[in-house]
Image: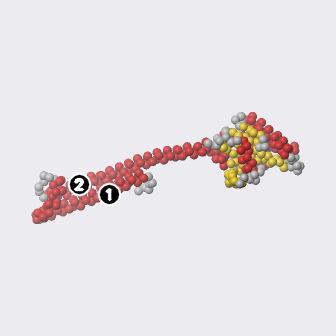
């Protein structure tokens, strides 16, 4: 008997187990009575006195089967009739097995339909967790290294040069994307399908501009890129804050993505900029702790950009 946790199937099996026990018991009783009546018939044929003392015990059942019979052969006929009754009871055993199998099959079919519906609903629910992620951001910030002192004003000017050039390039190619150029270049979009194309274009533009500026001003640009995703409209200042908090975790010259972004990215079966999970990082701020689960896309972003340019 196959193991099952279906309560209804267990109840069906238990019911038919009891029915089979009753049938078996009936067959045993019939076989025993048949044997007794045949032995009794043999006894009364041998000695009439047996009939005088015991007929009151055996006659009622015999008369039930053969009410018009008066000879002692009624007991032989009763024994044979009882034996023949075993056949329909055996057939009942077979019918019980068939009915049980049919009921279990029907119940299993019902459970299969319910299970399929449950799996479909689970699949819909699982898809919803990806569908609710409806937008993403790419943040680019720059640090500078030079033998000369670089003032904050100079950094702001350099940032503006780099960011405005990249913004112009992206705006021409991606009308649906929003590009904000401040202390951090922030690109936001809902079109995940164009992410790879946009990211590649950003890298190519940054690589060319970086090479020109580094040659012209004799300094080194250290870029930092973070990709994140959101389930609702996220203010630009919040996106910038998240990027800077991640950067504080000692991830300079890295291209990173968050677990939220990677979840949606892989769901869409994209792999080019998937990155490698590097764990969860904690950040303490104002007496509380925030965590970021991150993936590293490029460990040495400057080197990657050099290979592009």
Would you name the residue on which mark 1 appears?
Answer: 21
Category of crowding for the residue at label 2, using alpha-carbon neighbours closer than 10 angstroms: few (below 14), some (14–19), many (at least 20): some
Question: Is residue 242 something one can see in this rendering?
Answer: yes
Percent of width and height locating residue 226: 72, 46
Question: Is residue 196 something one can see in this rendering?
Answer: no
Is residue 284 rendered to the left or right of residue 119? right
Residue appearing at x 73%, y 43% in the figure: 237
Percent of width and height locating residue 66: 16, 53
In which quadrant is the N terminus drawn? bottom left
Q: CA distance from mark 2 to mark 1?
A: 20 Å
Q: State the mark number for residue 84.
A: 2
- Between residue 230 and residue 115, name the one nearer to us: 230
Residue appearing at x 77%, y 36% in the figure: 168
Is disc 1 placed on a helix, strand or loop?
A: helix
Percent of width and height locating residue 300: 76, 51
- Between residue 205 and residue 80, name the one nearer to us: 205
User: Would you identify the image quadrant in which residue 158 lies?
Assistant: top right
How is this picture coloured? secondary structure
In which quadrant is the C terminus drawn? top right
Percent of width and height locating residue 258: 68, 48
Is residue 40 rendered to the left or right of residue 24? left
- Between residue 221 and residue 34, name the one nearer to us: 221
Residue appearing at x 13%, y 58% in the figure: 72
Q: Looking at the picture, does residue 132 appear above or below residue 287?
A: above
How many circles with numbers are drawn on the protein?
Answer: 2
Q: State the mark number for residue 77.
A: none
Q: Looking at the picture, does residue 56 appear above or below residue 218?
A: below
Is disc 2 placed on a helix, strand or loop?
A: helix
Mark 2 vs 1, N-terminal side: 1
Residue appearing at x 31%, y 53% in the figure: 93
Is residue 262 rendered to the left or right of residue 80? right
Q: Residue furthest front?
A: 287
């Amino acid at each position: 008997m196959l193991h099952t946790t279906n309560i209804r199937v267990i109840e069906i099996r238990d019911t038919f187990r009891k029915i089979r026990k009753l049938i078996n018991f009936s067959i045993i009783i019939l076989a025993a009575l048949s044997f007794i009546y045949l032995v009794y018939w043999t006894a009364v044929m041998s000695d009439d006195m047996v009939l005088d003392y015991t007929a009151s015990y055996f006659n009622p059942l015999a008369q039930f089967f053969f009410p018009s019979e008066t000879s002692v052969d009624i007991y032989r006929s009763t024994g044979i009739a009882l034996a023949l009754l075993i056949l329909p009871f055996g057939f009942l055993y077979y019918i019980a097995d068939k009915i049980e199998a049919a009921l279990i099959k029907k119940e299993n079919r019902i459970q299969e339909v319910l299970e399929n519906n449950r799996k479909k609903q689970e699949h819909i629910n699982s898809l919803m967790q990806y569908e609710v992620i409806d937008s993403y951001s790419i943040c680019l910030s720059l640090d500078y290294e030079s033998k000369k002192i670089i003032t904050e004003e100079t950094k702001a000017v350099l940032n503006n040069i780099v960011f405005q050039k990249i913004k112009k390039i992206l705006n021409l190619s991606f009308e649906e994307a929003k590009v904000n150029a401040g202390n951090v270049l922030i690109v936001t979009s809902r079109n995940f399908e164009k992410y790879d194309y946009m990211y590649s274009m950003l890298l190519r533009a940054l690589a060319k501009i970086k090479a020109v500026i580094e040659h012209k001003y004799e300094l080194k640009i250290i870029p930092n890129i973070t990709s994140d995703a959101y389930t609702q409209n996220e203010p630009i200042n919040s996106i910038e804050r998240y990027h800077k908090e991640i950067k504080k975790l000692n991830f300079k010259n890295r291209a990173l993505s968050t677990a939220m972004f990677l979840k949606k990215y892989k769901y869409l079966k994209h792999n080019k900029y998937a990155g490698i999970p590097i764990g969860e990082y904690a950040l303490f701020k104002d007496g509380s702790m925030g965590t970021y689960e991150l993936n590293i896309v490029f460990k040495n972003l400057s080197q990657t950009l050099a290979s592009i340019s």
